[in-house]
Image: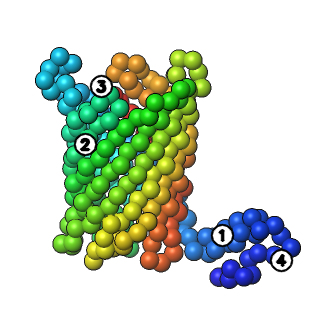
Amino acid sequence: MPSLGSCVPLRSPLLVGAVACLGAVANAQTVDDGGAWFGWFAQGKLAAADSSLASLRWWLDVQDRLRDEGEHFDQWLLRPGLGWALTDRFTLWAGYAYIATDPVRRDEFGENRLWQQLTWSAPTEGFTLQGRARLEQRFVETDGDTGHRLRLFGKAMVPLTDDEGLFVSVWDEAFWDLNDTDWGERTGFRQNRAFAGPGFQLAAAPKVWLEVGYLNQWIDRRGPDKENHLLSISLFTVF
């Protein structure tokens, strides 16, 4: 592994040298893989606008994830939830998730999660800006420890046509483990996901759109870090 002192030529600009150094260290400490993630994300209202429960919302997402250049099953996820709209822009949510994982060189296992989140949209002109803060309590079936995790998500959707039928979607999500567990959580920044790609509106009522693009997933591990280069295909439905 190159040392920091050997990475930066003495006569090179500081910024160029630093970038080259970080790239060399990252390449030496990162395991790369390709794969594909597929998901359906849906939400809607549970009552009519004139009902006393008009603020009640429902949430459901289903995901299937492949690893090893898309050749092997990696993870499957089901996440239902309920929400309460505080305003037109802020909604509180709570729910449950089940995740089945088939890791490399380990037996398949299940994970149960409880989750709570706040979602919001920011007032913008010419594009859509959304955010989410999620807390998770993670229960792995092979161990009794409870893991606590914080996830922060931000997304921008920029229309490319006047009717918003075609747009660009860009988002990033950062993960922090909030405690240590026997099954692998370690307090600190553990993962980042970043996506970019085109989106296509398929219907207006209910609102349905498709986002297809590149998803980069970086995971901090006890050994070499993991970096996944993924094809992401997501269908969104808002009722």
Badge number at residue 239: 3
Real-space CA distance between mark 3 and mark 1, rounded to the nearest whole angstrom? 46 Å
In terms of sequence position, does the residue under pointer 3 or pointer 1 come before the other? 1
Q: Earlier in the sequence, mark 2 or mark 4?
A: 4
Dots 2, 1 in contact, CB < 8 A: no
Binning the other alpha carbons within 10 Å of mark 4 as few (below 14), some (14 to 19) or many (20 upward) gives: few
Residue type, mark 1 in image = Leu
Amino acid at pointer 3:
Phe
Earlier residue among tags 3 and 2: 2
Tell me which residue sits at (29%, 55%) in the image.
Answer: 135
How far apart are the two marked residues, 1 and 4, measured between alpha carbons? 16 Å
Q: Residues within 10 Å of mark 1 (few under 14, many from 20)?
A: some
Three-letter code, disc 4? Leu
Q: Amino acid at mark 2?
A: Trp
* Residue at (25, 52) in percent of width and height: 115
Quick one: SS at disc 4?
loop
Q: Quadrant of the N terminus?
A: bottom right
Q: Position of residue 34 (x, y in %)?
A: 53, 57
Q: Residues within 10 Å of mark 3 (few under 14, many from 20)?
A: some
Q: Is residue 147 visible?
A: yes
Residue beneath label 1, please?
22
- Looking at marks 1 and 4 on the same chain, the residue that comes earlier in the sequence is marked by 4
Q: Determine which residue is flagged by label 2.
A: 93
Q: Is 192 located above or below residue 61 in the figure? A: below
Residue 138 position within the rendered picture, expressed as x and y whole percent measured from the top left? 25, 62
| Of callouts 2 and 1, the N-terminal one | 1
How far is disc 2 from disc 1 in space, using C-alphas?
39 Å
Mark 4 or mark 3: name the one nearer the start of the chain: 4
Residue 142 drawn at (x, y percent): 21, 71
Q: Kindly identify the residue that appears in the image at 44 percent across and 34 percent down.
A: 122
Front residue of this view, candidates 14 and 140: 14
